[in-house]
Amino acid sequence: MTASTIPARRPWGLMRHSLALTGRNLTKVRRNPGIFLDALFMPVMFLLMFVYLFGGAVSGSTGEYLRYLFPGILVMTTVLAGLLSTGLSINRDIKKGVFDRFRSLPIGRSAPLIGSVLSDSARYLVTLVTLFAVGFLMGFRVETGPVEALAACALAVLLGFALSWITVVVGVLIKEEAIVQTVAFLGIFPLAFGTSMVAPTDTLPGWLQSWVEINPVTHAVEAVRGLLLGGPVAEAATATVLWSVAFLVVLVPLSVWAYQRRV
């Protein structure tokens, strides 16, 4: 019996191992809370910058623009939290030899990756709480109800979690940390800003409108906007869930394959 076959014979073995490694990563965060600083400052920076720099030009008033912008910022900050942190933390652990130690343990091969992604998901909660607090102080109000607001947060977190596996693949395949960070930034801009987040898309050129229509982040923004402010939700929410599942189905096995080849 080899180490790699032991977990498969134990019920829920992979889940237990992944949660144990999630706890290990959260312990690191507790000892170094500065890791969460970007999750605290990023939503504040984006919200203040866009509302007070562009609110008057786009909507005529900062209040109206805050109402339009807030759902998009909520989605974008969860996407950014996943794309910027997960791949980098995995890349650093591999370079330090931490994953070599994991490889010698009788745990599922995907458990270290899942544990890293789940622990980084805690950043989403910090991001969302910070964003709602700042938005409330600026004047934003949820116009539906608490259930719809929680559903909006769940959709944003689901998409951010699914997209974070992109940087897991990148963090495992690429050895240089600086290149991992560069690739993550390059992936962020078309996903986050090629949407209806900051302005209606009616005036965009045709080719860009085509990208906005198929961009999974666009569907998430529209679904969250409907859940927080009222309006049609079903089609955009369904598209967000389907995109998220598709990302997970493709990227999780690819990440495990790349991890096995790397370590």
Image (spheres, helix red, strand yellow):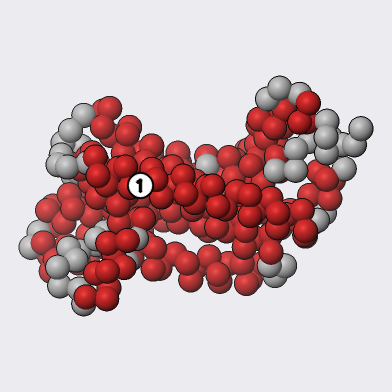
Q: Residue 191's quadrant in the figure?
A: bottom left
Q: Quadrant of the C terminus?
A: bottom right
Q: Residues within 10 Å of mark 1 (few under 14, many from 20)?
A: many
> How far from the left and from the top, in percent, is residue 22?
65, 36
Q: Residue at x 62, y 63 (%)?
A: 170
Q: Which residue is mark 1?
A: 240
* Vertical arrangement, residue 59 with respect to residue 178, above or below: above
**Residue 141 visible:** no
- Please state which of residues 87 and 163 is positioned toward the viewer in this rendering: 163
Q: Quadrant of the N terminus?
A: top right
**Left or right, 172 with reference to 104:** left
**Left or right, 202 with reference to 196:** left
Q: Residue at x 12, y 53 (%)?
A: 64
**Left or right, 111 with reference to 158:** right
> How far from the left and from the top, in percent, is residue 67?
17, 49
Q: Residue at x 16, y 36 (%)?
A: 143
**Residue 187 visible:** yes
> How far from the left and from the top, in percent, is residue 161?
49, 46
Can you name the residue that lies furthest to the right here? 1
**Left or right, 239 with reference to 63:** right
- Please state which of residues 7 and 156 is positioned toward the viewer in this rendering: 7
Can you name the residue that lies furthest to the left here? 60
Residue type at the position of mark 1: Thr
- Please state which of residues 158 and 240 is positioned toward the viewer in this rendering: 240
Number of numbered markers: 1
Query: Mark 1: which secondary structure?
Result: helix
Q: Residue at x 30, y 42 (%)?
A: 237
- Please state which of residues 190 and 55 is positioned toward the viewer in this rendering: 190
> How far from the left and from the top, in percent, is residue 195?
29, 62
